[in-house]
Image: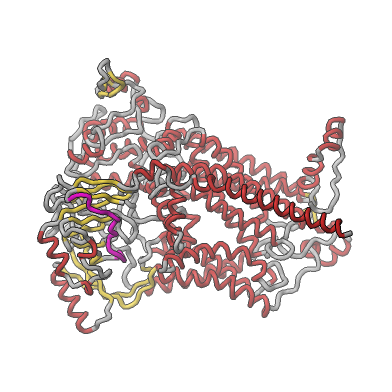
Amino acid sequence: MSDHSSTYEPTNGFTRWLDERLPIMRLMHGQFIDFPTPRNLNYLWTFGAILTFCLAIQLITGIVLAMHFIPHGDFAFASVEHIMRDVNWGDLIRYTHFVGASMFFLAAYIHMFRGLYFGSYKSPREIIWILGVLIILCMIITAFMGYSLVWGQMSFWAVTVITNLFTAIPIVGESITQWIWGGYSVGDPTLNRLFSLHYLFPFIIVALVALHIWALHVVGSNNPTGVEPKTENDSVSFYPYYVIKDSFATMVFALLFAWFVFYAPNYLGHSDNFIEANPLQTPPHIVPEWYFLPFYAILRAIPDKLLGVVTMMAAICVLFIIPWLDTSKIRSTRYRPLLKPFFWLFVITCLVLGYCGAKSPDYRFVEMADTQKYTSKAAAVSAKEEILSKNKHADLEIIESINSKEITYDLKNTKFKLTNQVLSLLLTFYYFAFFFAIMPIVGLIETPHKLPGSIAESVLGKSSADKAQ
Amino acid sequence: MKLKLSDFLKCMSASISVLMVTSLLAVTPAQAAGGGGPEIKRQVWSFNGFFGKYNKAQLQRGFGVYKEVCAACHGLKLLSYRNLVQVGGPEFSKEQALAIAKEATIIDGVDEDGEPKEREGKLSDRFASPFKNDTQARASNNGALPPDFSVIAKARTYHRHVPWYTEPYYWAYDMATGYEEKGVDYLYALLTGYKTPPRGMKLGDGMNYNEVFPGHQIAMAAPLSEDAVEYADGTPTSLNQHAKDVSAFLAWASEPHLNARKDLGKRVLIYLTILALLLFLAKRSLWARVKH
Amino acid sequence: MSSDNDDVARRDFLMVAAGSVAGVGGACALWPLIDQMNPDASAKALASIEVDLSPIKDGQAITIMWRGKPIFIRKRTADDIKAAQEIPVSDLPDPEADTDRVQNDEWLVLIGICTHLGCIPRGQAAGDVHGDFGGWFCPCHGSHYDTSGRIRKGPAPKNLAVPPYKFLTDTKIKIG
């Protein structure tokens, strides 16, 4: 761990005895009491603590829920409803777990964007960042498996769609998919193993989090200036300063969390998941939970099945290599005038991608069309043929619309349209361009603002920082 | 140390103006194909929002409608008769609930010959289903399967007819106000949405026209009519009132602990606010010594 | 000196040998743990099923489950067959001759999953919508299939798949 020495002094016979055999108190004291932390961290740095809080909540509620859940196709849906109706406090425990997944991802995404903005992935923090990407990857897998356990329509068809992605792998795709299913389609064996793995993965996440914090404590926290602490004046001890600050921020986050649990617990879910899984009927629109929507949009943006899967995977895996894609020596985007607008455009891209993921692929964001109303289908069809005879490439569509009085047929002659598919593709392009083109190039050509000499200087101003030394 | 909010806002305003321009370009409102039908209206529900609570009398009336009309085809298999007594629900008396349970025939165990044995219902029994299985249900309903009603009020939704660039605003509004009644609003609109079909519309065999049902053709005939069910409490027995009451009852059936949840929620929010405030004051006094 | 070298060489060899044997053993022990996830004996037992076709009348269709998927079996009428064979193959979105999709003109056997997004098309029951081409119609996104289960109109990219099957007798088939 970090090279600062712990000031821990055992105070009584027992702690002295323990310290000679297992210096765990010394370790904890050094890492979480004395630990020097930059004095200028803003509230975005509280999300580490908030995420630990989220993980703890998910673990505790999850272990409790597993005492009541039945991982079998015939009983899973009913057992979830049994939890909601009959188990003491069951509805609150389940809603906390369900909303907790959303809150976990919300906090994780903010944490990631913070790391991206302030260059927390740069040397010497590459390993911290890579461990973080592994954590988000495990979170995605865990959340996906957890969502399937409800065994509603959306659960079942999400599993069907996602496991079917493996069939895109050439030659062995089919066998791998059957291996995952444990059968020839999604069924009981699939549900049972998803449950087993959903219970396992959080502990992998815990282990990765431990490594993440270990790696963080070797090199210390980054800070908004990106300038490393140089003197004692740049840092404060973790306890009490950041313990209190993190606790306050966590409670504010808990307020938002509680709002959803108590007043909008189902808002972030999908109504189709209250229909029990039915392998013979597909819901009209299959949409994942909100936190997967940007990735889902990337998947659908590419018309080719295999290429789509590869692109979606790449969207996550590219994060592993950004420490080496960013060529700038400056960490914090605050001092990078050229990167800054590109960064915010990237944030907006991710948000709009999420929006695209929620809409059907043929949804039209922008449309310019002449619409002609007809009262009979035959008239609309003959009008359509007449236009086609003049212009073979006309984009024509007959839309039947029914209102309480009559049925009309609108012949829509589309001149220009921006479909979800096209928009998603453009945004996907920018998503990758940001990492593969903008990050490397901007770092080379940009003239950064002048960095403060030290953290203390950025906080106190130059003269008083010198005086303090 | 603050995040440069101004830059963020600059980016946001730029993107918003881009959105405005594109929206002006949209000559016709971009709407999902196959839509149509009127916008589903939001009703005033006693259980909506921060102070929402079920109205006991309404749930009792709604149960009456369910029992007299819906129960012939639609089950409530996740509910038990004891739930009718439960606090925060219709809160029937034990005797009333027992009388309701006794009307049901429950198959329980086998007699000496190994044949299934029937008995009358008890409070601990699940609601008896109107059909033995889905196949029988389909056979008696012209091939259509009447869905179970246990969670129907959460299993239905509708799409608001708004331009896409205003949708995030509505999402935020609904989250902030705790609007979770999309399903109930849909149920009410469906029950009151039976109209005479438009001129020229050919309905399938045994199908009925409903203006809010997706595709407008529904196998279920209009289930409610004026004075279909008697109300003991003197509430007017209009079709709309029946629809409203039974929708409210189904909302309770799908979310039976809503009253307790919203009640506890207020205490939790107050507690968290106080704790956050104390932590904030502690943080402020602690950090007062350290410029940051 | 040389004996020392021999000793070292022998020791290295033994280390490598022991390591390899341990590695092979470990890999062998791993295989059952991986293979247990493959379809088990009870699932494999259902991998093929036999269907008696005798009760199906002209123009009727039945749905049976095979490997968790719905299988449509339809006894086609003379008109159905004629319609399926008349259309020029080159006009189809997914060109395939009717004769390549059936083993016996009368019997059409299909996997009843829409090739668009996996919905179950309608058209099995007598009263169902059959689409514009007398076959099946997918309610999700409006794909129309003809009396050979071929896509004719709508977003689906491919014809309904034909499962592997063979006739055991004139009125009995084995699927899978």
From the viewer's side, name the closer residue of B83 and A180. Answer: A180
Where is residue A94 drawn, in percent x and y?
49, 39
> Which scheme is used to colour this image of the protein?
secondary structure
- Judge whether residue B292 can be spotted in this image: no
Rendered position, C30 above or below A127: above
Quarter occupied by the N terminus of chain C: bottom right
In the rendered image, the residue lying farthest to the left is C78
In the rendered image, the residue lying farthest to the front is C3
From the viewer's side, name the closer residue of A166 and A115. Answer: A166
Where is residue A327 drawn, in percent x and y?
68, 73
Where is residue A425 drawn, in percent x and y?
45, 70
In the rendered image, the residue lying farthest to the top is B112
At 41% from the left and 71% from the top, the residue drawn is A422
- Quarter of the image for residue A391 reads bottom left
Predominant secondary structure, magenta span: loop
Number of callouts: 0
Q: Is residue A159 left or right of residue A34?
A: left
Q: Is residue A177 left or right of residue A249?
A: left
Q: Which residues are magenta?
A: C155-169
- Judge whether residue A129 can be spotted in this image: yes
At 46% from the left and 62% from the top, the residue drawn is A169
State yes or no: residue C163 in magenta. Answer: yes
Q: Is residue C135 left or right of residue C29?
A: left
At 80% from the left and 55% from the top, the residue drawn is A235
State yes or no: residue A252 in magenta. Answer: no
Rendered position, B62 above or below B154: above
From the viewer's side, name the closer residue of A327 and A281. Answer: A281
Where is residue A451 drawn, in percent x and y?
76, 70
